[in-house]
Image (cartoon, rainbow, N blue to C red):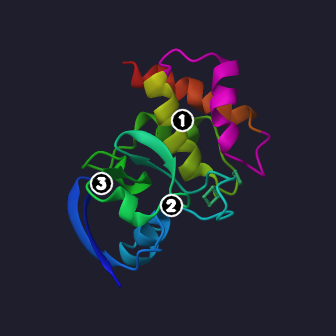
């Protein structure tokens, strides 16, 4: 049995027919071709699959696509302006070299934007605590934390 879904993804109305067991990350990557959202663990631990659902950061491997029916979903592909200008948080990760291999980066950026929306003046301790659900095997986190602080300042402008 298939289910038919209607949702908004990166500002566009999307209709999809999926197996009820389909995860949101599978819908995004496999059916919609939005492969900027990564799968690192498939068990809700690494945060590489983080997207925004109705404005909140969500691990898309932990959500059935059907649970996002009617929702507004934003992925990393939906952050840049129409003219290609990066979101201030993306620019901050680039400027602060908050990445190495980049595998965790999309999830980090999506979580970072959500945390700054909730804590516009987040301290370093808050940034570190809020990013506990996003694992990076490369950077040691120092430049990621710097990037989030710089991105927060840029988002406040
Ligand atoms: S792939 Fe979703 S948390 Fe790791
Ligand atoms: S930059 Fe490689 S996993 Fe984070």
- Magenta-highlighted residues: 119-140
Mark 2 and mark 1: Cα distance apart in space: 15 Å
**Image height of 25 relative to 155, above or below:** below
Mark 3 and mark 2: Cα distance apart in space: 13 Å
| Residue that carries the numbered disc 2 in the rendered image | 37
Q: Is residue 143 visible?
A: yes
Extreme residue in the front direction: 1
Q: Are marks 3 and 1 in contact (CB under 8 Å)?
A: no
Q: Earlier in the sequence, mark 3 or mark 1?
A: 3
**Image height of 122 relative to 41, above or below:** above
Q: Quadrant of ligand 1?
A: bottom right
In the rendered structure, the answer to whether residue 5 lies left or right of residue 90 reads left
Q: Earlier in the sequence, mark 3 or mark 2?
A: 3
Could you say where residue 151 lies in the image, as x and y percent from the top left? 50, 29
In the rendered image, the quadrant that contains the N terminus is: bottom left
Q: Residue at x 57, y 30 (%)?
A: 148
Disc ID at residue 69? none
| Residue that carries the numbered disc 1 in the rendered image | 112
Mark 3 and mark 1: Cα distance apart in space: 18 Å
Could you say where residue 75 lies in the image, as x and y percent from the top left? 41, 54
| Residue that carries the numbered disc 3 in the rendered image | 10
> Residue 156 lies in what quarter of the image?
top left
Q: Residue at x 37, y 64 (%)?
A: 66
Is the distance from the Cβ of mark 2 to the nearest ligand 1 atom less than 8 Å?
no
Is residue 123 found inside the magenta-colored segment of the image?
yes
């Amino acid at each position: 049995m298939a289910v038919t879904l209607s949702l908004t993804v990166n500002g566009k109305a999307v209709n999809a027919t999926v197996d009820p067991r389909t995860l949101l990350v599978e819908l995004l990557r496999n059916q919609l071709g939005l492969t900027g959202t990564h799968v690192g663990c498939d068990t809700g631990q690494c945060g590489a699959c983080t997207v925004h659902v109705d404005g909140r950061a969500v691990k898309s491997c932990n959500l059935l696509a059907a649970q996002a029916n009617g929702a507004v979903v934003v992925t990393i592909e939906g952050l840049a302006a129409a003219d290609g200008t990066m979101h201030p948080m993306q620019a901050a990760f680039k400027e602060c070299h908050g990445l190495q291999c980049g595998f965790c980066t999309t999830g980090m950026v999506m979580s970072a934007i959500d945390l700054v929306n909730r804590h516009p003046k987040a301290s370093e301790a808050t940034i570190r605590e809020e990013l506990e659900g996003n694992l990076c095997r490369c950077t040691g986190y120092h430049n990621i934390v710097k990037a989030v602080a710089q991105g927060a300042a840029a988002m406040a402008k």
